Image: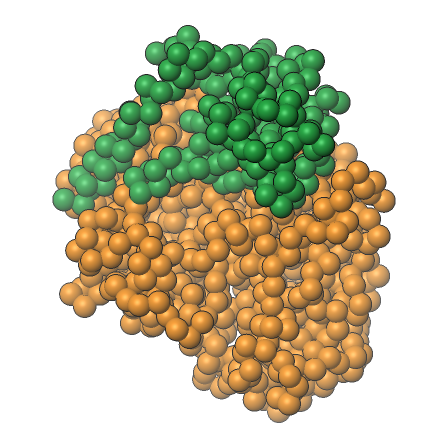
Chain colours: A green, B orange
Amino acid sequence: MMEFFIDPNRCIGCQSCVQACSECDTHKGHSMIHLEYVDRATSVQTAPVVCMHCDQPTCAEVCPADAIKRTADGVVQTARKPRCIACSNCVLACPFGVPEVKVELKMMMKCDMCYDRTSVGKKPMCATVCPSQALFFGTREQLEQLRPRSTPVNQFQFGAQTITTKVNMLVPKTGKAEYIYVTAALNETTIGKEITLNILQEAYD
Amino acid sequence: MATLPNQLDSITQRYGPHLTFNTGVRLATGVEPDKVVKTHCCFCGQQCGIQLKVKDNQVIGFEPWEDFPFNQGMLCPKGVKRYLQGAHPDRLTTALERDEKAAAGFRPLGYDTAIQRVASEIQRIQSTYGNEAFGILSGASLTIEKAYLMGKFARVALKTPNIDYNGRLCMVSAAAGNKKAFGIDRAANPWADMLSSEVIWIAGANVAECAPITTNYVWQARERGAKIIVVDPRITPIARTCDLFLPIKPGRDIALFNGILHLMIENDWLDHEFINNHSVGFDALAKHVKQWTPRHTAEATGITERAIRQAAEMWGQAKSSFLLHARGIEHHSHGVQNVLGAINIVLASGRIGRDGCGYATITGQGNGQGGREHGQKCDQLPGARDITNPEHRAYIAGVWGIDEKEMPGAGVDAYELIRKIERGEIKGLLSLCFNPVVSLPDNEYVARMLDKLEFYCVIDFFLNESAYHADIVLPGSLHEEDEGIVTQIEGRVIKINKAIDPPGEAKQDWRIIQDISKAMGRERGFTFTEPREILDELRVASKGGIADYSGITYEKIEAQGGVFWPCPDNDHKGTERLFEPNSWNPIAKGAGPFYFPDGKARFNVAPYTPPTEDTDDEYPLMLTTGRVVSQFLSGTQTRRIGPLVNQYPEPRIELHPQLAEKLGIKDGDWATAETRRGAITLQASVVTTIRPDTIFIPYHWPGRKSANRLTIAAQDPISKIPEYKVCAVKLRKSEAPTND
């Protein structure tokens, strides 16, 4: 079975995923990927965010119009156009910040893992083009062969809420964690900040 | 005569750059394309495979080409959006003639009339001032067929020595260094060889932004245990997570390589067997680098002694390695010496010519490799032959059916060609695939020189900024409107396939060149009816040369997923890796793997010299220039593609917060960078990812946003590459410019 794996360690911020996302036939012209600098003033680090496709999607749970459906194979879809009332509940509730309300369409849109492609055995557009393969789509066997230093995690802790997702985050095998404690991580300093400052400072002094 | 028209606003209103986005059929879902064409990206030297979807003679989108071995479907944002350059409102569909009375400075002209006019102007200039008074500037984004034809056109139809190309701004330092050390100019290894390297050394290469797909090769090597060393004045995305980052002062690379070699010798981290049996010149070099102690190296490079020792240890003790470099070390007035320094530490390690042991420059332009091999360079003939070598001349004269005595000698480099305009030695110019007023250094001088010409003809598909100075503009072809071969970053020759026909009166560039030849009454040798016929002639012309393409056909390329040159006969499958032990080549004839009569590689003493323009009290900072991932070269194409422009709309000045504080500049403030050539005012980006004594500006924009208003026209004495990567600059806070 092919699965989606994200390795932010590899991301180079090129936006190829963002640009390719808007070429996907189910949502042409709209990119569903968020790619942000973590803190450009101190680092070139970027983080690509696709929908994590939760087992129990918070976006669907808070939707008053029951417009967000999850397919039998676990893909959480864009809001159903006839039902969506563009209330933004999902936007506010999603712990990963994925859904977006498209004002001009009066509806919410989000990553559906290129359902038109993945449902027929193709890779999603973003993971196909990603030059650093920070976004990787393949089997567990391929992952083990290609990424021996990393291990996939698909449990996330947000305060009291534990979320299990279809999409995996790759973490280093050294210091392996059972789950990623997101709210705790919010208070951490960007890794690399002090290091990069020191290297350049030392060089200059 | 061809002065810049006053109505600049009306020119840009009419001819752009306007932005295209996916609209209409390109936005509609579920559209069945008429055909899907397997071809390659039109931008950088990686030449990623891509499939273009075509409907009603328009490229409406793309589909990744996952079976192509190099990129396996991967694409950078430029490749993803390149299709939006087609069916563009700015596209030139007729010839244009300069007309001061016309609303936008030009009026449309019938194609045949335009060709006649170009031919008669060439003849007028040549009969008045001599053949040499007409010059040609060509480009390394052209297919090999076109590049070959341009060289032939200059020497045979125009009989002028004065042709050069924009690879002069790109590949020539690496080419000269490779020829001196190896006797051949090509990436030594396919990229797959990187995967089993213990150490990858990346010098002056912003891999993530300039060769994005190469990133996956580097990361994949790291997954298998490779350590990554990056040398750059900026923490680029590839440097962010590397194992060792060396924040070098711009222009000091040779000092670092000499310092590393010093430590390799001191610690005996050398491959004596390789040095003794397969190289020449080590002793003289060892003597030279004695002075490059870690302390001396640290002083020159601005890198700490500790980091230099660490790098030497990682490099010196590795069992396998791959060294990559790019324009960061090559764009210098001592660019060739920097390249030689890099090669010296590779040769001293003996780690070349096998899997996991490699060396390469990262070629910049689409056909940066192939475009520099077949004769559009001022001193070169097809097959990487030398125009001053009597045997080479005789052979090519035979292929071309001319008397060897009629063939002009060596011309001058592209920048010298511009200087020749100032001296009145060049009166007429034709440029193709080259936008000198954006891409050449000190470009306000270049613009003045174009205005001095009696006649200037530009062939392009959009009205690039240099064409504003033209008398006649001929409508050329986009990448997807022609076919031909290109040699990518690894030395792999690939095939560009035609997807659509050129619109209106636009024509494939090689047809335009042939039409001019015919109008001049010199059509002999210019009667090809398709690119395949040009390739057939090139195969003969390159036969026996170092860049031997004689066994390369469109069919073989398709069957094998590309063919690595040299490929000297029809049964040969090509040469993926150079310098393999016991390999044969036509120069060494079995004496050894390198391309010299004795088969041995050359160590070269590479003395350190500082940049041509060092900092002083008046200009206390260093300026370095480069690319961003969403733009390409002078931006003629990418500044017209909406989503790419939106990704990075305007150039910014990158500076360190320490410097920013001293100058009172905050992130987003306007700041003026000024050198002895000129000044430009841009917004500041205050980031800790750059040396505090250096500022960075990307170079893709024209006019008052052009980094090349600032850069220096100093050149390497051997390669003639301009020193884009360092000059002295001062910076001050300022107000937003009003003359937008």
Residue found at x 63% / y 33%? A85
Determine if residue A25 is in view: yes
- Left or right: residue B125 compared with residue B355: right
Q: Position of residue B158 (x, y in %)?
A: 67, 76
Q: In the rendered view of the protein, which quadrant contains the N terminus of chain B?
A: bottom right
Residue found at x 55% / y 51%? B644
Residue found at x 54% / y 33%? A88
Q: Quadrant of residue B47?
A: top right
Q: Quadrant of residue B288?
A: top left
- Left or right: residue B693 compared with residue B700: left
Q: Quadrant of residue B76?
A: top right
Residue found at x 50% / y 74%? B417
Q: Position of residue B559 (x, y in %)?
A: 77, 34
Q: Say if B150 sits above or below B98 in the image.
A: above
Q: Say if B630 sits above or below A17 in the image.
A: below
Q: Position of residue B197 (x, y in %)?
A: 45, 25
Q: Say if B480 sits above or below B511 in the image.
A: above
Q: Say if B620 sits above or below B459 in the image.
A: above
